[in-house]
Image (cartoon, rainbow, N blue to C red):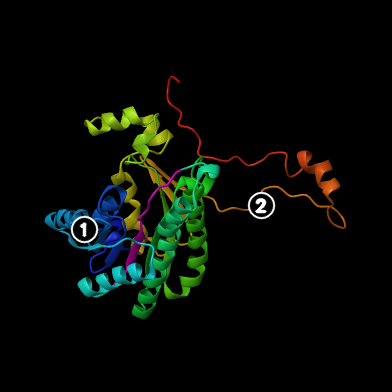
Amino acid sequence: MTPPSAASAIDLTGKAAVVTGSGRGLGLAYATALARAGAAVVVNDIDEAVAEQAAKTITEAGGRAVAEAVAVGTTEAAERLVARAVEAFGRLDILVTNAGILRDRVLWKMTDEDFDAVIGVHLKGTFTLARAAAVQLREQGEGGSLILVGSPAGQRGNFGQTNYAAAKAGIAAFVRTWSMELGRAGITVNAIVPVAATAMTETIPAFAPYIEAMHRGEPLPDFLRKGEGFGTPEDCAALIPFLASQAARDVTGQCIGIGGDKLALWSHPQEVSLAYADGGWTPETIAATWHTSVGSEPQSVGIPAPKIPGE
């Protein structure tokens, strides 16, 4: 049998998707990329006017899209978004959980409200949406794709982001768990770990002048696009139709980074150094051997600082 061409394998004609937080930025880029590949899209944003305008932009470009304004995080919102896809397009095949907020503060200044708000949108929002989508996809019996949105902060931690990093680390755990639970139903589950010029990254001082130049029409330099894997939202969006397509039917349980010219597979946590003690360990024997055995090369934390030429 002749294998399908790359173009036909990415064709999403007849598929329907929900993309949360897709009124602007990365989410809009994801929704647009899916529509260009042939999928019909439910565009979601908390702001109804923004969601409607995003859907209009997609339809005016020849795609199929409807808007649904609702804040994610509750079971009701999740079921409403899935129902909107079924109502508008007759089915659901793809879920992209992009909606998110930030409430950055160091640990000793972070309030319960700061923590709960971010966990509610990112972690509970992803859970409730994936659960609602899984019910619909299993009922349809034709497989599907859950594409969760992670972050480098969830892979390595980030100063001032207790809530956000914890939520994104939890999303990576969702990917590993749900890929096992949903595999028999033909549903793939993966995370995209994007790095792009957005309203959030524009606040990073090292990136700011380059992003300003990009907005003036100047290309981002290679040290950003390749060295940092940092580019536009559209650069990151290329991964979404791939993960939703037949070309990625055997890709599941993975956290995949993309940004600029860089595509990367993130490792799963695993034991990297081992030591054994006959009869078990005591605090004293651990202390005596730690620095010359398992603790000799401690793991690093945090997102590496950008390497700016000349600095």
Rendered residue at 21%/53% (across/down): 50
Q: Quadrant of the N terminus?
A: bottom left
Q: Earlier in the sequence, mark 1 or mark 2?
A: 1
Q: Point out which mark residue 192 bears.
A: none
Boundaries of the magenta span: 92-104
* Residue situated in front as seen by the camera: 42 or 276: 42
Instruction: Inspect this view and state whether residue 70 appears.
Output: yes
Q: Amino acid at mark 2?
A: Glu
Which mark is drawn over residue 271?
A: 2
Between the residue at mark 1 and the residue at mark 2, the CA separation in whole angstroms equals: 47 Å
Where residue 60 sits: x, y (%)? 12, 55
Q: Which residue is pictured at 30% across the width and 45% down the height?
A: 233
Q: Residue at x 81, y 47 (%)?
A: 286
> x and y percent of residue 47 in the render?
24, 55
Residue 155 picture location, percent across and down: 51, 48
The foreground one among 291 and 11 is 291
